[in-house]
Image: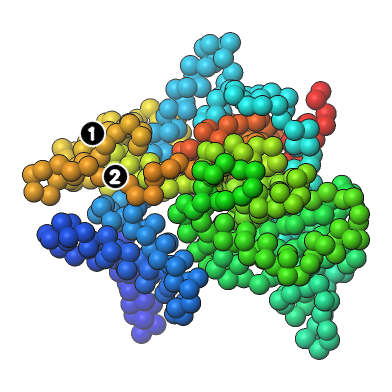
Amino acid sequence: MQALVIYTWVAIGLIIIGILLLFDPMKRPSRQGLVESGSLGSHYIQLWEKRCRFLCCVRSADENSSEAFKNVADVFASLFEDSDLVASDLAAALVLLRLKRKHEERQEESFRKTNLHMPICRSSTASIGALQDEGGLPHQQSPRPEWMKVGSAHHFMKFALASYGWPWFVYGRFCQACCSLWSHLHCCTCCRAAPNYVMQDNCCLCHTAALRAITGLTEENITYITFHNKIYEVPFFVAIDDETQNVVVAIRGTLSLHDAITDLNAQCTNVCIEGLPESCLAHKGMVQAARFVLRRLDETRALAEAFAARSGYGLVITGHSLGAGTAVVLASLMRPQYPNLKCFAFSPPGGLCSKEFALATQNFVMSVVVGDDLVPRLSMNSLHDLRHKIMCVLDTCRQPKYRVLAQGCWYMLFGISASSLDSASSVESPSQDRPLLDSTANSYTYESLEDVQVTFSEDGTHRPQVPRHTEIPLYPPGRILYCFPKLPEDERLDGSTGEWEFTWGEMKGFSQILISPFMLRHHLPQIVLAALEDAAVQASDPS
């Protein structure tokens, strides 16, 4: 009987997984009449809005949440409304794209090795070209401000990491982190008053304890901390850094579903700020979050108190991921009042600023990108470009899906060997007569999204498909310091091993998503801190 019950639950689990992988989840209605009436897009928007609300357990209809969920649903609908792909199709496409990229990198590296005058380009740096030292500058850029140094970035990354509180602090080193937190905990604050500068921490002030353990700040150096978190409303803290003589505003990155909704609210909105061009556009969710932080700073007078305690100190605004994007917009909003402020943006979203806005931030924003990090390369344009490449690779692949997925599982466990690459020009070595993506109506090429016009046919006529939300390309902000592992990928056991090198990159070099095993790992704040620590040592010791 026990064996029968276990078998039944396993069978149910496999059936659910099979449904998720093999069946279309979009509930697509009949296309006849819907395309002409224009109601197909609204059907998908309503469907994705229900899913987002269900996932976030939000049923209220306040103005902020309603607008946010509609915008997020519009983003998802624009990506998936014209494709009949299921999860297994996407998994197979990612395997094929990884093989294709790995094969191209291998060819490029072999070519560069035979041409000794050209620097060898590692896989992580393939998108931005030749390496440059810290003093080098990409083409078409003005001289870099003196304060933009690797050591300074490493110092303020500690504040960005501290804004997350205890979850990322204990990640990967639970026992050691608990010992470090113990001396900073305030137990049973539910029975006694918490410090007046802390808002909405837990009963033992674990977030505040982690913040102090990471930064080494005392209670006298912390002016204000809030962990209040809703859509468009992000946690942050204000502290006095006597080491660098700056008041620091550190904004937390993504750590909740509310933060994820803010991230996904990726439409453009105008940023009207004194001193910036009128055509500046930015990520809508992060503009709203920056305005929330600015309002809270004005209401609490946290900055005024910090500057009153330390007259003559400068202002630094920093953050990681969502916090980085919010910090950049906040720095732009506050710059008319604090013209000498500095902003350190760690792993900022790629879909943050229009070109005019990104160029305008180069004098006061220093961005840091590590390795194959997905987020600084993530924008609506790069997502549609990836979607286009997925359709291309599925349309040209002649291998059965099960074989591609089996190869992907093998590569995840044992890596991609040279022999596999030689035999795995999978995209170009057919083993069946029809493509993996069985669609005679579509026509795809390996051209970039900017140079190709994808067409589809319903009744024998071809109509152009123009991706929504891609009219204006968005870029990472400011001057970009790019850190990458020194060892080639085949010699790395994980994303943190080996020393790190660094160079100054251009914003256009991060316009495409790189399919890599480390595309998520390189986004972790601990990895960013480790890379900057190693790069700072190299920068301080040129020999």
- Place of residue 146 in the rendered image (x, y in percent of width and height, measured from the top left): 78, 32
Q: How many C-alpha atoms fall within 10 Å of the one at disc 2: few (<14), some, or many (≥20)? A: few
The reply to whether the C-beta atoms of the residues labelled 1 and 2 are less than 8 Å apart is: no
The residue where tag 2 is placed is 466
Residue sitting at the far bottom: 191
Mark 1 or mark 2, earlier in chain: 1
Residue at horizontal 52 percent and vertical 29 percent from the top: 126
Dot 1 amino acid type = Pro
Disc 2, SS: loop
Position of residue 356 relative to residue 156, above or below, is: above
How many angstroms separate mark 1 from mark 2 (CA)? 31 Å
Residue at horizontal 61 percent and vertical 49 percent from the top: 273
Position of residue 140 relative to residue 88, above or below, is: above
Q: Is residue 177 visible?
A: no
The residue where tag 1 is placed is 430
Residue at horizontal 50 percent and vertical 64 percent from the top: 261
**Quarter containing the C terminus:** top right
Q: Nearer the viewer, residue 235 or 299?
A: 299
Disc 1, SS: loop
- Place of residue 416 in the rendered image (x, y in percent of width and height, measured from the top left): 46, 37
